[in-house]
Image (spheres, helix red, strand yellow):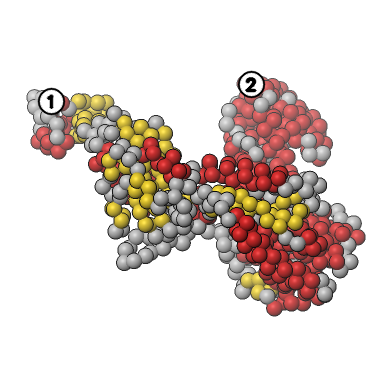
Amino acid sequence: MAKDLLFELGTEEIPARFMAPALRQMKELLEAGLKELRLDYSTLNVYGTPRRLALLVKELAEQQSDLAEEVKGPSIKAAYDGDGNPTKAVLGFARGQGVQVEDLVVQETPTGKYVFATKRNAGQSAEAVLPDMLTSIVHKLYFPKPMRWGDSDLKFARPIRWIAALLGNEVLKITIGDIKADRFSRSHRFLGSGVVELASPQEYIQKLKENYCIVDQEERKELIWEQITAVAAENRGKVHKDEKLLEEVTQLLEYPTALCGSFEEKYLALPQELLITPMREHQRYFPVFKEDGSLLPKFITVRNGLEKHIDIVTAGNEKVLRARLADAEFFYTEDLKKNLEDNVAKLDTIVFHEKLGSLGDKVKRVEKLARYIGTQLGFSAEELNATSRAAFLAKADLVSNVVYEFPELQGIMGEYYARHAGEEEAVAVAIREHYLPRFAGDELPATKIGMALSIADKLDSIVGFFGMDIQPTGSQDPYALRRQALGIVHTVLNRDLEISLSKMVEESDQLLTEQVDFIHSPEKTLGDLLAFFKQRMENVLSEAGVRYDVINAVLAGQLDNLDVANQKAVALSAFRETEEFRQLITGFKRAANLAKNATHSQVKEELLSDPAETQLYQEFQKVKKAADSLLQAKDYQKALTMIGELRTVIDVFFTAVMVMVEDEEIKENRLALLKQIADYVKNIADLSQLVD
């Protein structure tokens, strides 16, 4: 027999950002718990609203499956005497396991023959074992800021107000804090019957829905989006799908009703982002757009309730937004009364980090570093001057009125203010782009100056913190150094920027040490940072679908040029699938392994006595000459294919020639030949890291 299980924790309103992680944890903990308890089931789902977290398991076994466990006992020599009689050791073992001596079996193990007992534990009822497991789930749930209430030691996201726990038609005996489980849930806070009695778990979703609470968050999300798009269409507009905002709104309410409000058209004269940010970030409104992408003077929000008195709710939302937009207009107008350049001097009074100086200090470093990067990328004199100017103004909007009120608009407002001040378009765009990418999947800087400035700004922070021995540890990365490093990697790879990472780090280190006293030496900082960026490269290549052994082969040496490493990974991935690779790899690995014994790579032709080694040497010189030009052109796949032509002569060499001969001079010469070949291929990748 099987029964359904319902476990619902009723709480005060849980913050929306806590909900998705909590539901994920609950599901994982329940899956693991039921597996450990040996309770089978058909389906398991988790549900959540601001006032509840719920688990619903269909067709859960009423009884644990029996457990048969093999326990290893003494060796057969210790278990029985010379006459085959059981010793005290085996008698004690059998008694301890609750079995008869005659039920013991002898099994062969890697260390000899031992006796084993099969210990059988009868399964208990689900009703008996579930309460402790469900209680433990509640205590194991992690929240960023848990609360305590009353005189209980229990910590949770918000105070627990009720517990509904049903196995079939019966209430489970569970007590958490001072709350005992029952068969009662709660409706929408202001709608429905208040208390909702449940005869069985099967009633849960439907009865709550009848009481204006849609507990299935996916159903709620789908309904919200349908309503939003329908309301937008009714108002001759459309809404861009914003998954983050949609998820947040879904977790803020239990029974959605979308509505459309409006604001004065005069505010459309403000920068679009200055309207969208208060709507989306502060009020959780969805902006409404025309077909051409421009804003309509409308917004859509979702109330937690019915359409009754919707006009009053709409007016209230319009009033709140009107005040926000009036503030935005005032701050923007005040900011335009002075040039962006006038703000730069104020950056000297703002601390970037107590060990790394002020924001003004950072701007000076970034300006020089961005110009250095531009020089390495072949910028013209005009582009270098624009790079310096963009770096000089990049942080100036941080002290503007708008960015002080709406920090999300840093860089964006800088672009508007730079245009208003008559700066070059390339300078204005670079100010915005230097913050990109801001998060995983975000857009990348598109202009040359924006790329140089973005890399310089991020690298200055990374080098500075590493030089001060402030590095990410485990899950702790308070200065987002991993994100910034990934931003550099993605920018370099996606924009095909061929530039030396180590030289950029060294330049940044030098600029920083002119202003601050580093804890670490430049060599230590460089080594740590190259290893740090290598980890980021591994992640990026792995996410792109590159095999782990290809990544190991390409990144086996020192990482310097990120884009070149990426090109090599792509080329090696393709070469790995060819017949040439399969024929070459065995012989090459043997050559590489022997080459480790070489003391040098200087081959003396006069010592090449066997035709097979002479042929290998001569063929390698031909291949090397042809492959050199391919490597120069960074055509790594063709270069690998060219090297693959050595497969036949390598096989002949190993068939005909004994490398490790007694004649020391000949042996060293043959090892040197193999080392030459191995070292040359390592210019692309260490093929010995590849798995056949």
Residue 397 in percent (x, y) is at 75, 68
Q: Give, as a three-letter code, the residue at label 2.
A: Ala
Residue count near mark 1 (Cα–Cα under 10 Å), binned few <14, some 14–19, many ≥20: few
Above or below residue 594? Residue 422 is below
Using the image, tell me which numbered label, if any, was put on residue 56: none
Residue 178 in percent (x, y) is at 29, 59
> Which residue is at the front of the view, 405 or 218?
218
Q: Look at discs 2 and 1 and give the one toward the viewer.
A: 1
Residue 502 in percent (x, y) is at 70, 55
Residue 50 in percent (x, y) is at 48, 53
Above or below residue 570? Residue 532 is below
The residue wearing badge 1 is 102
User: Residue at the location (82% across, 53% down)?
Assistant: 448
For label 1, the SS is helix
Based on the displayed image, in which of its 4 quarters is residue 274 positioned? bottom right
User: Residue at the location (24% across, 34% down)?
Assistant: 123
> Which residue is at the front of the view, 204 or 83?
204
Residue count near mark 2 (Cα–Cα under 10 Å), binned few <14, some 14–19, many ≥20: few
User: Residue at the location (57% across, 42% down)?
Assistant: 223
Does residue 347 appear left or right of residue 134 in this picture? right
Q: Give, as a three-letter code, the residue at label 1.
A: Glu
Does residue 333 appear left or right of residue 43 in this picture? right
Using the image, tell me which numbered label, if any, was put on residue 656: 2
> Which residue is at the front of the view, 480 or 462?
480
For label 2, the SS is helix
Based on the displayed image, in which of its 4 quarters is residue 643 positioned? top right
Sequence-wise, the earlier of marks 2 and 1 is 1
Which quarter of the figure is the N terminus placed in? Answer: top left
> Which residue is at the front of the view, 186 or 313?
313
Total numbered circles: 2
